[in-house]
Image (cartoon, helix red, strand yellow):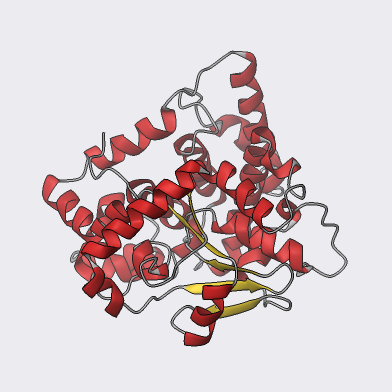
């Protein structure tokens, strides 16, 4: 509670220093609104938005027909993000009507350190195949002048540095919402949110927000760390293998995607980096005919092994992210910091990587 108050005080101080700029800034974000209980959520992708969309759909009964949904995490990722809303209102934040409602009704948003948000976006959208057929192709065209015919067909090898380079080239033109600066999405200087949570204190803040709207007891199961990791691993695996039919022919290799998922789970701190990808075990199994089940079995075996062997994750997630940024030139990093300058200042993040 004290942290939430301190965030608001700090944010108001920064807003006062940038009042002229922020008062003119047109927010680009979208608000999901619940009817009962009344709550407005300014969506910040790559800052816990899948979890909050699951919670909103769960509370509103906006779920698949004939599906068994006991907790928000039972609602799958594809449905959460891409199926039409029936019982939730989605409104662009620039709409003066929603802004007027948010002055008198409960509203919240979630921030995230720009460094971890960008790294997470890269892993989720470009290391994995989600955006190969869309943004990755545009980025390769913009930042790779000698792109091969294969690059322009598949766009499945965008580097983290190329991703950052595209952002600084494109800005200040509005960016994709997954890496658009959060101050541009939700403009907390223009909208007085009741709660500004953070990804770094997500569990604590989520419980507090649910308590504020009278629903403190609905998500006990999904908050257990072991449950959350298992659900995230299963969700990402199913989602990414299901993308095969959407990717151009010759660009989606199941074993390659499995390897990318393995690396993603290591980057996210789910699988210890010392555990090698099980190439041979997958090749000798029925992986081709049942990739999801076969791959998940190997991931669970690895997670059980590291638990039984007392392998310590420690700061693996942070260390692997820092290794990626250390391959970025100081000039490019400075330009990235300039793009996200107000996110660092408004939400109290240190611009220094270490």
Q: Is residue 180 visible?
A: no
Q: Nearer the viewer, residue 335 or 215?
A: 215
Image: 164 above or below 249? above
Q: Position of residue 228 (x, y in %)?
A: 65, 41
Q: Position of residue 230 (x, y in %)?
A: 67, 39
Residue found at the far top of this picture: 309
Q: Looking at the image, which residue is at 30% across and 40% down?
A: 324
Q: Position of residue 188 (x, y in %)?
A: 39, 65
Image: 350 above or below 52? above
Q: Looking at the image, which residue is at 73% across and 79% down?
A: 86
Q: Nearer the viewer, residue 49 or 291?
A: 49
Quadrant position of the C terminus in the picture: top left
Q: Nearer the viewer, residue 269 or 71?
A: 71
Q: Is residue 131 visible?
A: yes
Image: 351 above or below 173? above
Relative placement, left or right, of 93 versus 135 is: right
Q: Quadrant of residue 61?
A: bottom right
Relative placement, left or right, of 260 versus 231 is: left
Q: Nearer the viewer, residue 138 or 214?
A: 214
The mark tally for this picture is 0
Residue found at the far right of this picture: 66
Relative placement, left or right, of 14 versus 100 is: left
Q: Looking at the image, which residue is at 29% across and 57% down?
A: 13
Q: Looking at the image, which residue is at 65% across and 47% down?
A: 288
Residue found at the far left of this picture: 331
Relative placement, left or right, of 266 versus 21 is: right
Q: Position of residue 14 (x, y in %)?
A: 27, 58
């Amino acid at each position: 509670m004290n942290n939430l108050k301190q965030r608001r005080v700090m944010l108001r101080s920064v807003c006062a220093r940038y009042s002229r700029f922020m008062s003119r800034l047109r927010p680009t974000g979208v608000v999901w609104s619940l009817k009962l209980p009344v709550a407005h959520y300014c969506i910040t992708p790559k800052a816990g938005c899948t979890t909050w969309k699951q919670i909103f759909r769960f509370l509103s009964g906006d779920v698949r027909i004939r599906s068994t949904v006991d907790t928000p995490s039972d609602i799958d990722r594809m449905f959460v993000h891409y199926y039409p809303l029936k019982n939730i209102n989605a409104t662009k934040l620039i709409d003066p009507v929603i802004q007027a409602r948010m002055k008198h009704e409960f509203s919240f948003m979630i921030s995230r350190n720009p460094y971890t948000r960008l790294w997470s976006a890269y892993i989720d959208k470009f290391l994995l195949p989600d955006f190969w057929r869309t943004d990755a192709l545009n980025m390769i065209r913009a930042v790779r002048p000698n792109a091969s015919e294969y690059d322009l067909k598949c766009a499945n090898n965008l580097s983290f540095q190329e991703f950052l380079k595209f952002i600084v080239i494109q800005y200040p033109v509005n960016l994709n919402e997954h890496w658009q600066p959060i101050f541009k999405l939700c403009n907390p200087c223009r909208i007085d949110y009741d709660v500004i949570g953070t990804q770094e204190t997500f569990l604590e803040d989520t419980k507090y927000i649910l308590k504020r709207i009278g629903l403190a007891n609905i998500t006990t199961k999904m908050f257990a760390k072991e449950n959350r990791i298992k659900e995230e691993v299963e969700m990402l695996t199913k989602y990414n293998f299901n993308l095969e039919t959407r990717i151009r022919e010759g660009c989606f290799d199941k074993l390659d995607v499995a390897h990318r998922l393995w690396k993603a789970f290591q980057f996210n701190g789910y699988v210890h980096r010392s555990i090698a990808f099980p190439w041979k075990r997958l090749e000798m199994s029925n992986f081709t005919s049942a990739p999801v089940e076969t791959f998940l079995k190997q991931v669970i075996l690895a997670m059980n092994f590291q638990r039984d062997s007392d392998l310590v994750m420690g700061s693996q997630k942070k260390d692997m992210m820092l290794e990626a940024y250390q391959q970025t030139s100081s000039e490019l990093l400075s330009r990235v910091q300039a793009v996200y300058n107000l996110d660092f200042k408004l939400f109290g993040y240190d611009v220094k990587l270490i």
